[in-house]
């Protein structure tokens, strides 16, 4: 591609995702778009081809230079394309295998085109991009597909995308002056690093034998739950009245759900730490023309059972902690820690993925997605040509010891809960139980909050 900025050295977070990848624990993210209507194969294939041409890292693989530097290079053959499934199973994702970035590009795509329903599923190596970037790719696909179908083609434009901006993808809006000003706050973040290193969180069911088994042939194993538009409205009101964010509320209820689940599975004691890994976007206005990439970090929240038992106090504590993380830009602490690892003897490869449980679960909230799409809508759902986008499912990767991940997606007024679980460590019935418990905790907390609001109003 003439406008490609490749080759490019991997930045710290990309290397972390690459080093964290294992055949038994693929570091891939999954996005599924579910439609009403029959997808046109020619238009769908052409749309994906146009999208991949806009995002250089989707058509790249990794090479090691003579100096041992990991570098993105273009893939000249095996350009990512759609694999059309002839016997679609609407509730089942395609069977997937790990992606080897040293031999292939980091994107795979599958599509179904039934008489009444269609779908597009993307599997992407997390070293390539994060969840928000993958949604950007999906948005590009919908716009391109609509243009391919000739529907309102003149009024639909793909968002600005400049390949050369990938060179600055790890700047995070920082200048030398801003970096110097934030150093005191980052030094305070070392307390969080110390806690991360010294405290050992529990896995969801304490003992896990996942590391001894190969990746299941059924991979990926997933569950999807949902809050309807009425519950989402109640959630927004309850969070606002409590002077917290919706994300704070959902984190609090996930802590209580996980603790309740572990108690019923007889897998908890009062002195164990439950730790959540929470991805945090680091995007700034300067990134608005950036192609698909990782502009994300992670923060870690941990609580013991006694702290979780105080529901109101837990919500206040989570809000205070998340507010502090945002105000002091402490999402960058994890990135700076990765940069330090790179400079230590043996580099990142010596210290990443050591087989320990670093987090009990992952909770990744993508927020309200595709809110600025120029495509028309029907009952709040995006219409792309002859297709109506019914649902968006996002599944984050799990790792050794972290057996469950949850992706949260707000779309068309509803909230989708997308769980991926390691079936070597947790059964399907247990995954159903955890999902049911979480949704029940949210609805119960909303009922309680609404009664309190009505009582205060009276």
Image (cartoon, grey):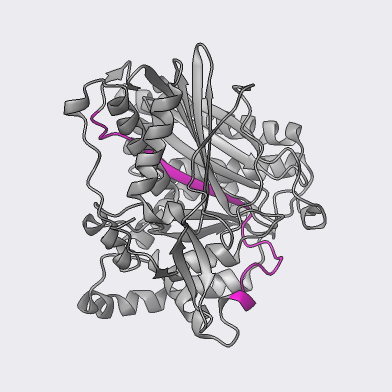
Q: Nearer the viewer, residue 127 or 60?
A: 60
- Establish if 2 lies above or below 350: above
Q: Provide the residue span drawn in magenta.
A: 349-374
Lateral position of residue 126 relative to residue 361, left or right:
left
Q: Residue at x 68, y 69 (%)?
A: 354
Q: Position of residue 38 (x, y in %)?
A: 46, 16
Magenta-span inclusion, residue 88 = no
Figure quadrant of the N terminus: bottom left
Figure quadrant of the C terminus: top left
Q: Main secondary structure of the magenta part?
A: loop
The extreme bottom residue here reads: 345
Q: Position of residue 173 (x, y in %)?
A: 26, 65
Lateral position of residue 412 relative to residue 108, left or right:
left
Q: Position of residue 20 (x, y in %)?
A: 60, 63
Q: Residue at x 24, y 42 (%)?
A: 159
From this viewpoint, is residue 376 visible?
yes
- Establish if 36 lies above or below 119: above
**Quarter of image, res 6:** bottom left
Q: Report the number of discs.
A: 0
């Amino acid at each position: 591609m003439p406008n490609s900025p490749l080759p490019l050295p991997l930045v710290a977070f990309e290397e972390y995702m690459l080093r964290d990848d294992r055949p038994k624990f693929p570091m891939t993210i999954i996005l599924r778009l579910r439609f009403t209507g029959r997808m046109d194969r020619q238009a769908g294939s052409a749309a994906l081809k146009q999208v991949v041409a806009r995002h250089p890292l989707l058509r790249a693989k990794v090479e090691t230079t003579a100096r041992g530097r990991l570098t993105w290079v273009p893939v000249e053959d095996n350009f990512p394309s759609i694999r059309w499934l002839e016997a679609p199973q609407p509730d089942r994702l395609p069977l997937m295998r790990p992606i080897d970035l040293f031999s292939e590009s980091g994107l795979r795509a599958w599509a179904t085109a039934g008489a009444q329903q269609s779908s597009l599923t993307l599997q992407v190596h997390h070293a390539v991009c994060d969840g928000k970037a993958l949604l950007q790719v999906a948005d590009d696909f919908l716009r391109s597909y609509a243009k391919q179908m000739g529907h309102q083609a003149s009024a639909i434009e793909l968002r600005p995308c400049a390949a050369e901006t990938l060179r600055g993808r790890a700047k995070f809006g920082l200048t030398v002056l801003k970096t110097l000003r934030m150093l005191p706050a980052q030094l305070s973040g070392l307390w969080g690093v110390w806690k991360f290193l010294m405290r050992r969180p529990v896995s969801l069911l304490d003992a896990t034998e996942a590391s001894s088994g190969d990746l299941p042939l059924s991979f990926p194993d997933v569950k999807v739950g949902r809050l309807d538009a009425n519950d989402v409205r109640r959630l927004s009101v309850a969070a606002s009245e409590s002077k917290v964010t919706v994300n704070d509320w959902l984190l609090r209820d996930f802590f209580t759900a996980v603790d309740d689940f572990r108690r019923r599975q007889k897998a908890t004691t009062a002195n164990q730490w439950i730790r959540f890994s929470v991805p945090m976007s680091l995007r700034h206005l300067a990134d608005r023309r950036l192609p698909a990439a990782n502009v994300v970090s992670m923060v870690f929240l941990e609580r013991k059972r006694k702290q979780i038992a105080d529901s109101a106090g837990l919500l206040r504590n989570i809000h205070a902690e998340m507010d502090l993380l945002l105000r002091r830009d402490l999402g960058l602490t994890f990135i700076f820690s990765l940069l330090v690892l790179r400079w230590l003897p043996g580099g990142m490869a010596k210290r990443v993925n050591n087989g320990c449980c670093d987090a009990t679960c992952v909770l990744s909230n993508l927020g309200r997605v595709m809110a600025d799409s120029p495509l028309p809508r029907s009952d709040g759902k995006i219409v792309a040509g002859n297709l109506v986008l019914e649902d968006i499912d996002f599944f984050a990767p799990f790792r050794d010891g972290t057996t469950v991940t949850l992706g949260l997606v707000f779309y068309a007024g509803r909230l989708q809960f997308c769980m991926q679980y390691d079936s070597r460590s947790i059964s399907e019935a247990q995954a159903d139980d955890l999902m049911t418990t979480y949704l029940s905790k949210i609805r119960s907390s909303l009922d309680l909050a609404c009664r309190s609001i009505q009582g205060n109003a009276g």
